[in-house]
Image (cartoon, rainbow, N blue to C red):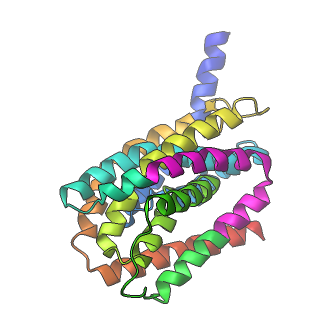
Amino acid sequence: MYAELSMELFHGIFTPQAVAAYIAIGIIAGFLAGLLGVGGGSVLVPALVWAFNLAALPQQWIFRLALGTSMATILFTSVSSVRAHHLHGAVRWDVVKNFIPGILLGTLFGTFLARHVSSNFLVLFFALFMGMVSFQMIFEYKPKPGRVLPGKWGQFVVAAFIGTASSLVAVGGGALTVPFLAWCNVPFKKAIGTASAMGFPIAVGGTIGFVFNGWTAPGLPPGSLGFVYLPALLFTVVASVLVAPFGAKAAHILPAHLLKKVFAVVLFFIVLNMLRGLL
């Protein structure tokens, strides 16, 4: 009887439709992670919400499961992406080192907030957050020529804010880190490469937080580890890790102004989709 129940559960989780959806989501997210340094979460969250609705997962936990699963996926995507950017000399490791303590603190705090605020608030915050960034990129805000990165403590404060905001919307930090570094006159392709390196510490803190804060949540679907849905994680990771290096390679072939436009358009359509779902 136990074996029959396990097989029934297995087939319920790993349906062909679900597997195909997770692989497709991973391919798109992995390519964008490498191309734009956004960790893939900007695409993963709304795509996983769609996939989890199709799979009829418990409605009250769908958005948090999408956040947690997205964050766990970035653990693997970021490593694949940053390796490719590092080979092109596009990662400012001095900035990464200064950001890591603030990022870890911010992500843990952000996952605590995500457990205790309403799903509608999270969706609205996600949409407004992405909308602000996309408009900034569309209108090509030009920083003052003399502006540079702040000192170590200034970078710590900025990193803590980015970590908190990123864990609330389960992105790898690129959606804020790329514009911030560009605002400080870091060349755009180096901003993308550096942001991709930020994805790993954000994902570490965020994944721990989502697992811990969802550990005792009632009514989670089978296959969940806290707010991380393992079946979706498995297939999105395999696809995204394989594809992310191709996105990173494309980032160093395409001109910077075109990358900015692509970045802005991707974020803008994500915002429209999330607001449509909220309304």
Image coordinates of residue 256 in percent, x first then y, are 30, 79
Residue 92 picture location, percent across and down = 30, 60
Outermost top residue: 1
Residue 38 position in % (x across, y down): 44, 62
Residue 19 shown in magenta: no
Magenta stretch: includes residue 120 = yes
Task: Report the residue at 47% width, 71% height from top.
Answer: 180
Q: Give the quadrant of the N terminus.
A: top right
Residue at x 71% of width, y 62% of height: 123
Quadrant location of residue 130?
Answer: bottom right
Residue in front for this viewpoint, 115 or 243 = 115
In the rendered structure, the answer to whether residue 3 lies left or right of residue 154 reads right
Image quarter where the C terminus lies is: bottom right
Task: Out of 274 and 85, give the one closest to the viewer.
Answer: 85
In this rendering, position of residue 177 left or right of residue 186: right
* 81 lies above or below 225: below
**Residues in magenta?**
99-127
**Residue at point 52% right, 73% down?**
267
Residue 255 pos. (x, y %): 26, 80
Q: Specify the quadrant of the image occupied by residue 219.
A: top right
Q: Residue at x 36, y 87 (%)?
A: 145
> What secondary structure prevails in the magenta region?
helix
> Residue 186 versus residue 212: which sits nearer the camera?
186
Up/down of 156 relative to 242, above or below:
below
